C-alpha cells in the first residue's frame, strides 16, 4: 500500500502533464492563404466602406424610379384672427374670427424631356460601377494579403535558415576552442569563429524582427488581434517547381479586361457620363404636368341672411359646420405646360459640361486599360525572370553548399584555415537566403498572373 501511493502521485502528475502540453500547442491557429483572404474580406473596413457606397447608390436608384409616382399631400390649417376681419358670408367686417381649412392635392409629371428615364439609366450604371468598386476593393485586398502572406513565409524560412547557420557557427566555435586549447589553432582562428557566431546572431535577430513585422502586417489586414498566435501554411515545394511561366501577355490582358472590376467600373462610369448628356439635354424640352386637388374651409362667424325684422333689418343665422364644409368645397384639376425659352444659357452650359465629363471618363477608361496592359506585360516578364532566378539561385546554393562541406572537411584535418572556412560559410549562407527569396518570389509572381486572370489565390493550383 505504501508503494502504490507514490506511483499514484506520479500517474496523476503524468496525466496533468499530458493534458497541459496539448493545450499550449492547440493555442496556435493554422491560417491558410485562402483562410487569410476570406477573413480579411469579411472584416476589412475599406471593403465595408465600398459596400456602403454601393448601398447608397441603390437607394438613389430607388429614388429615381419613384419619380414616376404622383405626389399626394394633405394640408390642414387653423387660425384665430383679432381685430376687424371681412366675413365672406355676411360681406361685413367682424371684430374677431376663428377659421380652419383643409385640402388634399396631387401632382403627376407627364413629360420632362426623358430626364427621369435617363436618370434611372444613369443610376443603374452608377450602382453597377459602385458594385464593381466593391469588387476592386476586394481584389486589392486579396493581392495585399497574398503579398504579405508570402512575405511572412519568406521571412519565416529566412529565420529558420539563420538559426540553422547560427547552430553551425556555434558548433564550429566549440571546435575552434578545443583546437586552441590543445594548440592546433591560433588565436586568430578562434577570433574568426567568435566573429562568425556574432554575425549569425545578428542575422537571427534581424530575420526575427522582419518575420514578426510581416506577421503583424498580415494580422492587421485580417483585422485580427496582434496578440493571437497563428502559424502559416507552407506551399508544397513541388508547386514551385511546376510553376507555369509560358503566358502570353496579350491573352492574359484579353481575359483581364473582361474580369477585372476596375476596368468594369471605368467602363460603367463612362456610360454614366454619356447618360448625363441626355439628362442635361432634357432641359431643352417642354415639361407637362397634371394637377388636382380639393379644398374646403370653415369660419366661426359664418352666417347667412334668413329674413328681415320689423325694421326691415336682415336677420342672420349661424351656418352649421357640416354645411360650411360642403358650401366651401373647391375641387380643381389642371394641366401645366412649361416651355423653356431662355434661362441665361444654363442648359447649354450643363450640356457642354456633361460632354466634357464624358470625354474625361473615356480618357480615364482608356488610361485604366493602358495601365492594365503595361502591368500585365511587366508581370509576365517578371514571372519568367523569377523562374530563371529560382533555378540559378538553386544551382548556386547547391554549389556553395558542396564547396563549404569540402572546405569544412579540409579545415577539420588542418588543410584549410579559418578564413577560407568562414568565407565559404558566408557564401553558402548568402546563397541559401537568395534561393529562399527566389522561391517565394516565383510563387508570388505566379499568383499575380492568377490574380489578373480572375483565378482564386491559394496554394492548390
Image (spheres, rainbow, N blue to C red):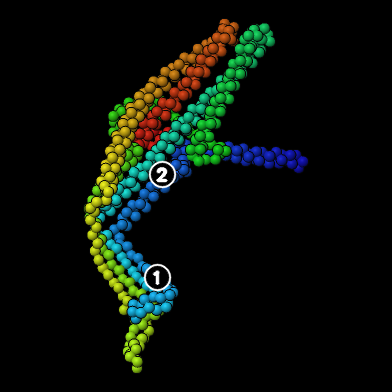
Q: Nearer the viewer, residue 93 or 108?
A: 93
- The residue pinned by badge 2 equals 50
Left or right of 375 on screen, residue 180: right
Question: In the image, residue 160 lies at what x, y percent?
Answer: 54, 25
**Residue 43: x %, y % from top left:** 47, 43
Q: Is residue 229 visible?
A: yes
From the viewer's perspective, tell me whether residue 433 is left or right of residue 21: left
Name the quadrant of the C terminus: top left
Question: Crowding at label 1, few (<14), some or many (≥20) Cα neighbours within 10 Å?
Answer: few
339 and 158: which is toward the camera: 339
Q: From where the camera sits, is residue 271 visible?
A: no
Closer to the camera, 14 or 143?
Answer: 143
Q: Residue furthest bottom?
A: 310
Q: Is 120 drawn above or below residue 304 in the view shown?
A: above
On screen, 71 above or below 376? Answer: below
- Residue drawn at point x = 53 percent, y = 12 percent: 424
Q: Secondary structure at mark 1?
A: strand
Q: Is residue 124 above or below residue 412?
A: below
Of the 4 image quadrants, the one containing the N terminus is top right
Indicate left or right for 141 with 348 as reference: right
For label 1, the residue is 77
Amino acid at each position: 500500500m505504501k508503494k502504490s501511493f507514490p506511483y499514484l502521485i506520479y500517474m496523476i502528475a503524468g496525466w496533468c502533464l499530458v493534458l497541459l502540453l496539448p493545450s499550449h500547442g492547440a493555442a496556435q491557429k493554422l491560417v491558410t492563404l485562402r483562410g487569410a483572404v476570406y477573413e480579411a474580406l469579411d472584416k476589412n473596413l475599406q471593403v465595408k466602406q465600398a459596400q456602403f457606397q454601393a448601398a447608397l447608390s441603390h437607394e438613389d436608384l430607388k429614388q429615381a424610379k419613384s419619380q414616376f409616382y404622383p405626389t399626394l399631400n394633405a394640408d390642414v390649417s387653423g387660425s384665430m384672427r383679432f381685430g376687424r376681419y371681412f366675413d365672406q358670408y355676411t360681406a361685413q367686417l367682424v371684430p374677431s374670427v376663428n377659421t380652419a381649412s383643409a385640402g388634399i392635392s396631387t401632382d403627376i409629371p407627364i413629360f420632362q424631356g426623358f430626364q427621369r428615364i435617363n436618370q434611372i439609366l444613369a443610376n443603374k450604371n452608377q450602382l453597377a460601377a459602385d458594385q464593381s468598386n466593391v469588387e476592386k476593393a476586394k481584389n486589392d485586398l486579396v493581392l495585399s494579403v497574398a503579398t504579405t502572406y508570402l512575405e511572412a513565409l519568406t521571412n519565416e524560412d529566412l529565420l529558420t535558415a539563420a538559426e540553422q547557420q547560427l547552430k553551425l557557427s556555434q558548433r564550429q566555435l566549440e571546435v575552434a576552442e578545443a583546437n586552441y586549447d590543445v594548440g592546433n589553432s591560433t588565436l586568430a582562428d578562434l577570433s574568426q569563429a567568435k566573429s562568425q557566431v556574432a554575425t549569425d546572431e545578428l542575422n537571427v535577430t534581424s530575420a526575427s524582427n522582419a518575420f514578426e513585422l510581416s506577421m503583424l502586417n498580415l494580422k492587421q489586414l485580417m483585422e485580427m488581434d496582434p496578440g493571437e498566435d497563428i502559424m502559416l501554411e507552407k506551399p508544397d515545394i513541388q508547386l514551385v517547381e511546376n510553376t507555369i511561366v509560358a503566358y502570353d501577355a496579350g491573352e492574359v490582358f484579353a481575359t483581364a479586361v473582361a474580369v477585372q472590376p476596375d476596368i468594369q467600373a471605368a467602363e460603367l462610369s463612362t456610360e454614366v457620363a454619356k447618360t448625363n448628356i441626355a439628362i442635361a439635354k432634357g432641359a431643352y424640352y417642354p415639361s407637362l404636368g397634371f394637377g388636382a386637388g380639393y379644398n374646403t374651409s370653415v369660419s366661426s362667424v359664418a352666417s347667412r341672411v334668413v329674413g328681415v325684422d320689423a325694421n326691415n333689418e336682415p336677420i342672420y343665422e349661424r351656418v352649421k359646420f357640416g354645411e360650411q364644409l360642403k358650401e366651401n368645397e373647391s375641387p380643381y384639376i389642371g394641366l401645366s405646360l412649361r416651355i423653356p425659352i431662355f434661362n441665361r444659357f444654363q442648359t447649354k452650359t450643363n450640356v457642354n459640361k456633361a460632354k466634357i465629363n464624358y470625354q474625361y471618363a473615356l480618357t480615364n477608361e482608356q488610361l485604366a486599360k493602358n495601365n492594365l496592359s503595361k502591368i500585365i506585360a511587366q508581370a509576365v516578364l517578371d514571372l519568367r525572370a523569377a523562374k530563371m532566378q529560382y533555378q540559378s539561385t538553386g544551382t548556386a546554393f547547391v554549389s556553395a553548399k558542396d564547396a563549404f562541406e569540402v572546405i569544412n572537411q579540409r579545415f577539420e584535418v588542418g588543410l584549410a584555415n579559418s578564413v577560407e572556412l568562414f568565407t565559404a560559410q558566408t557564401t553558402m549562407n548568402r546563397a541559401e537566403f537568395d534561393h529562399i527569396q527566389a522561391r517565394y518570389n516565383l510563387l508570388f509572381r505566379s499568383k499575380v498572373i492568377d490574380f489578373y486572370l480572375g483565378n482564386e489565390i491559394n496554394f492548390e493550383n
